Amino acid sequence: MSKGYWVAHVDVEDMETYKNYIAANAEPFSAYGARFLVRGGSREVREGAARARTVVIEFPSYKQALACYESEGYQKAKALRDPVSLGDLVIIEGYDG
């Protein structure tokens, strides 16, 4: 079974308020087996454009990645994030090659 990943690029307008989202997403991420692989950090944009913050989260399966996003717990956390950030999120199935 392939792992699932969230790949997010986010611009945060109010980091203090955004911290409420970070606290609120901990429970659904734990419930769905999420593990942060990238959470901000140093980077260089070599081609194209990117938002200020990049996050990559690994889930045990693609199905778990989708279910976490659709969960009530995550949607409540997302409601805290939406007013203070602008982002792009892709949920993608891993490669088992």
Image: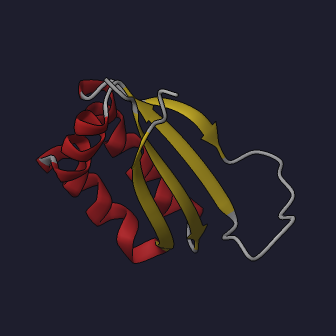
In the picture, measured across the screen, residue 12 lies left or right of residue 84, that is right
Residue 16 falls in image quadrant:
bottom right
Q: How is the image coloured?
A: secondary structure
Foreground residue among 75 and 44: 44
Above or below, comparing residue 35 to residue 38 in the picture: above
Q: Residue at x 39, y 29 (%)?
A: 3
The residue closer to the viewer here, 64 or 28, is 64
- Is residue 84 shown above or below 44? below
Image height check: is 40 above or below 1?
Answer: below
Q: Nearer the viewer, residue 51 or 59?
A: 59
Q: Determine the residue positioned at 52% across, 28% down.
A: 97
In-image side of 52 versus 95 (left or right):
right
Q: Position of residue 85 (x, y in %)?
A: 49, 72
Q: Is residue 47 left or right of residue 39?
A: right
Question: Quick one: quadrant of the N terminus?
Answer: top left
Which quadrant of the figure has residue 81? bottom left
